[in-house]
């Protein structure tokens, strides 16, 4: 038996657990549901802050901060959507 192949098999076996999913990390569907919930709550908080600022109950700095947070959230969602569409188009281009 070749010693190099034995060492390679041992190294592979040692590295294999590093690629296994960690227990308790949840599935991807749950992560997307949580991200969508966070996005919705960010937009709702911004709307509430904007409504308070219109009647004079909110600090202008709080309004600017809420608007910048919602802008960042929308840009993030658009970037994720673009990546999903790009991946879908790549799958469509694959030969069958």
Image (cartoon, grey):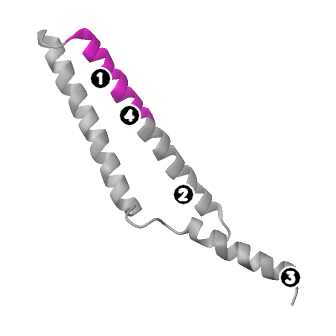
Name the residue that disc number 2 marks.
88
Span highlighted in magenta in the image? 59-75
Disc 4 and disc 3 in contact, CB within 8 angstroms: no
Residue 5 colored in magenta in the image: no
In front of the other: label 1 or label 2? 1
The relative height of residue 22 versus residue 31 in the rendered view (above or below) is below
Furthest-right residue in this view: 2
Q: Which mark is nearer the camera, 3 or 2?
A: 3
Residue occupied by mark 3: 3
Q: Is residue 41 visible?
A: yes
Label 2 Cα crowd, 10 Å radius (few <14 / some 14-19 / many 20+): few
Report, in whole angstroms, how far the alpha carbon at label 3 lies from the one at label 1. 62 Å
* Residue positioned 28% across, 11% down in the render: 61
Helix, strand or loop at disc 3?
Answer: helix
Alpha-carbon neighbours of circle 1 within 10 Å: few (<14), some, or many (≥20)? Answer: many
Question: Left or right of 9: which side holds 53?
Answer: left
Residue bearing the label numbered 1? 66
Q: Quadrant of residue 88?
A: bottom right
Point 17% across, 13% down: residue: 58
Q: What type of secondary structure mainly makes up the magenta span?
A: helix
Identify the residue position indicated by label 4 in the image: 73
Q: Residue at x 33, y 59 (%)?
A: 30
Q: CA distance from mark 4 to mark 3?
A: 54 Å
| Earlier-in-chain disc, 1 versus 2 | 1
| Precedes in sequence: disc 3 or disc 1 | 3
* Label 3 – label 2 distance at C-alpha: 45 Å
Tell me the SS state at disc 1. Answer: helix
Residue 25 on image: x %, y %: 40, 61
- Spot occupied by residue 31 in the image (x, y as percentages of width and height): 37, 55
């Amino acid at each position: 038996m070749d010693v190099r192949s034995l060492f390679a098999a041992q190294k592979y076996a040692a590295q294999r657990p590093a690629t296994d999913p960690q227990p308790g990390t949840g599935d991807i569907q749950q992560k997307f549901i949580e991200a969508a919930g966070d996005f919705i709550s960010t937009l709702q908080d911004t709307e509430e802050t904007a409504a308070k600022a219109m009647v004079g109950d909110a600090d202008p700095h709080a309004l600017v901060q809420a608007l910048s947070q919602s802008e960042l959230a929308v840009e993030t969602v658009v970037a994720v959507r673009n990546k999903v569409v790009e991946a879908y188009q790549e799958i469509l281009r694959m030969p069958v």
